[in-house]
Amino acid sequence: MAFRHRAEADQLRTALDSGGTAVLSQVLTGTGGVGKTQLAADYARTALKNGTVDVLVWISASSRQGIIAGYAQAGIELLAADPDKPEQCARAFLAWLEPKAGQKPCRWLVVLDDVADPADMRGWWPPASPHGRVLVTTRRREAVLTGAGRRVIAVGLFTPQKAAEYLTAVLDENHRHEPTDQIDGLAADLGYLPLALAQAAAYIVNAAISCADYRQRLADRRRKLADLLPEPSVLPDDQATTVAATWSLSIEHADRLRPVGLARPMLQLAAMLDPNGIPETVLTSDAALAHLTTHRTPGEREPTPVTAENAVEALRALHRLSLVDHTPGTPHQSVRIHQLIQRATRDNLPSDQRGRAARAAADALIDAWPDIERDTALAQALRANTDTLTRHAEDALYQAGGAHLVLFRTGRSLGQSGQAAAARDHFQHLATETRNRLGPYHPATLTARDHRAHWRDEAGDPAGAATDFAELLDDFEQVVGPDHLHTLTIRGSLAALQGKTGKPAEAAAALAELLDDFEQVVGPDNPHTLTTRGLLARSWGEAGEAAKAAAAFAELEVVIRRILGPDHPEALTVRSNLAVWRGKAGDAAGAATALAELLGDRLRILGPDHPDLLNARYELALWLAQAGDAAGSAAAYAKQLMERLRILGFDPHTLAQHTVFASWLGEEGHEAAAAAAFAEQWEYTLRVLGPDHLEALAAHSHLAQWRGRAGDAAGAAAAYAEVLEHLLHVLGPDHPHTLATRGNLAQWRGRAGDAAGAVAAFADLLDHTWRVLGPDHPHTLTARRSLSHWRGRAEGASVHQSTD
């Protein structure tokens, strides 16, 4: 692998040129193949070339015997020591390295390459000397490598830029010129690992294929990584092993560390999950511990079950050998692993073992997944790990005649996080897969279709969801019969959608009939029966009987609290419905009070990042406004906006929704509250998007408008002047938004008492509209009328002043 300068080389020179010992150990990415030996070789070559070293000793230090043999050979060559006594030769060489008074100093450099076990160095470290330097390369990360003048230098992956430069240079040397996007893509596919880049480039040249062809082969999971690398006999740059084989020795070492025999099965489990971060709770779950207990490396099996403490120790063993990066301080992404280590690990597993490891990983994800997703970062990490698992081992998740629960759990998590469209698409894919793999009437297929219809409705397509549920109802009735619990549940979903699609009376009739059926089949206190009661109550409200709906929800709340408890999610939903229908029945203040109390309970139960909190704040804002508390409504909605943007990120739909709400506040007579709401929106867009972004300019324009309508004409004029300055820069002087802003600025200048300023502004606007739109355009005519109006006002003011 042709050497390329790296930041670590500068760190190395700084450490060694000042004397002492430097230890190169990869950290963070922590894996073989990052170029430790190359950095050492570059330093040694440079030292010899510059004449700063008189004696260079390079030792392959992968074993204690190798270290002693290397020292002994140096003793034989430098001191003519007795070759029949290797340990004495080695001791003599180390003694020779000691500085001695009155003796001409000899500048020496000892390189101990690839120390496999720090214990091998016990008693064999070269002595500290002002004339000598020691350089060690190792994959280990134990604390024993520090101290005694030694400094650890972390050697990581190439940066994306360095990786692309390296691939380009190697291919150019072989008269191969590849597109930049393919070079960048290949570097990312290989995880910026220097050894992998070198061997992939050699394979491309030897096979006479393009980067795109190689990437396509690499993406084919049916191919093993070893098949996409050069033959061992033609490895580039005198490399000894392929990328696929470079970690095998480290795995063996890790498996011998305590707890013996657990590192390998732990690595196999981690190889199925997200390389960018695996929550520690997944790898220490009951399912993970059961897998580790069953698959402890043969010959090292212990009779006692593996504990969570043992699992963490196995992770630390892998960390010490730089096979994973274990950082307990980042709990949701505490285990990271290079993607090529994962692939090599999976490649080395027979298909049956790979399937078992995949299913164990899926079980571990389910174990770690909380029923209520209070922590959105954890939920996101679990979904990312499920996605990775599905990409690598989807077939294994359809074993035993069914589909693994994790496939359904990740879809529900998407929906519960507020991503209804993504949940719908996930279950569409799952419905297709289960149908193809298990058949159209398999319970998993029917369940996936049920979820797809539900999230289709939540994503804003109730008519399409009703069609899906109607088809699904026919299939359930054929497969399990009309009185089966699942059939009754689908009937409830379909009936509820009738209300959403404009048929609330029909919905109420269907749900009343369904409620009787549920009570006969499963009893009055069954959760399905209770859910149907809630749907029926809502349908009454949608049919215009708000008081009847409120009374029904009040009765249902008492039952729900008794059966499920006050903190159950269904109890919270019933309380929300009760408050809303009380409000629609005429008690807006009572609705606002109940929703404020419910918001506090939801915050306590669900956590601050749950999407239900966003909906609760939205409902509260609406009913505060209905109750006449415009300021409280604006504050609640501004809080909802900030929280939604914090949790879900920038979303034009969210800003549009906020614009509608704030404008509604103003139109209802709460102009000051509207201005305050738009001030919040403008502050956010200004901070996140910058002053020239159209969203920020739109918020600023709305703020100006409602400041003026709230009685602050001068503030409106000042705000419109700022908006105009940015629009001239962003859109130019003739854009419709710019022309509209000129008109608003002129109007509010006049209303602020500056009639002369309004005349000047409208005259300028008339020139632009005449030129851009023509003399007969409505906007031109409006500008002429406004100019005439304000000229009259200005002349009247002038006459009045002269009279005075």
Image (cartoon, grey):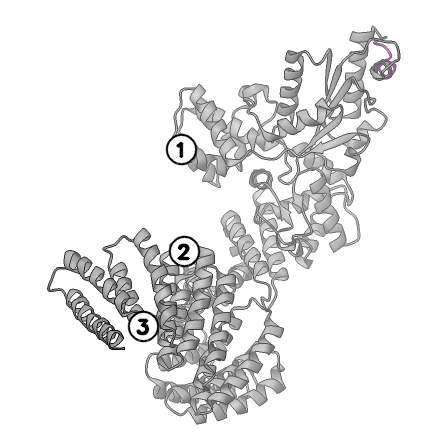
Q: Which mark is residue 691?
A: 2
Q: Earlier in the sequence, mark 1 or mark 2?
A: 1
Front label number (2 vs 3): 3
| Mark 1, secondary structure of its residue | helix
Residue mark closest to the camera, 3 vs 1 = 3
Look at the picture and state if 459 lies above or below 282: below
Question: In the rendered image, which quarter contains the C terminus?
Answer: bottom left
Residue at which label 3 appears: 753
Kindly identify the amino acid type of the residue bearing the numbered disc 2. Answer: Pro
Look at the image and tell me whether residue 79 can be seen: yes
Disc 1 residue type (three-letter): Thr
Q: CA distance from mark 1 to mark 2?
A: 34 Å
Of tags 1 and 2, the one toward the viewer is 2
- For label 1, the residue is 180
Q: Image quarter for residue 479?
A: bottom left
Residue furthest left in the image: 776
Q: Residue at x 42, y 76 (%)?
A: 672
Q: CA distance from mark 3 to mark 1?
A: 61 Å
Question: What secondary structure is found at the residue carrying circle 2?
Answer: loop
- Residue 42 percent coordinates (x, y): 62, 20
Which is more toward the observer, 528 or 112?
A: 112
Q: Residue at x 59, y 67 (%)?
A: 374
380 relative position to 112: left or right: left
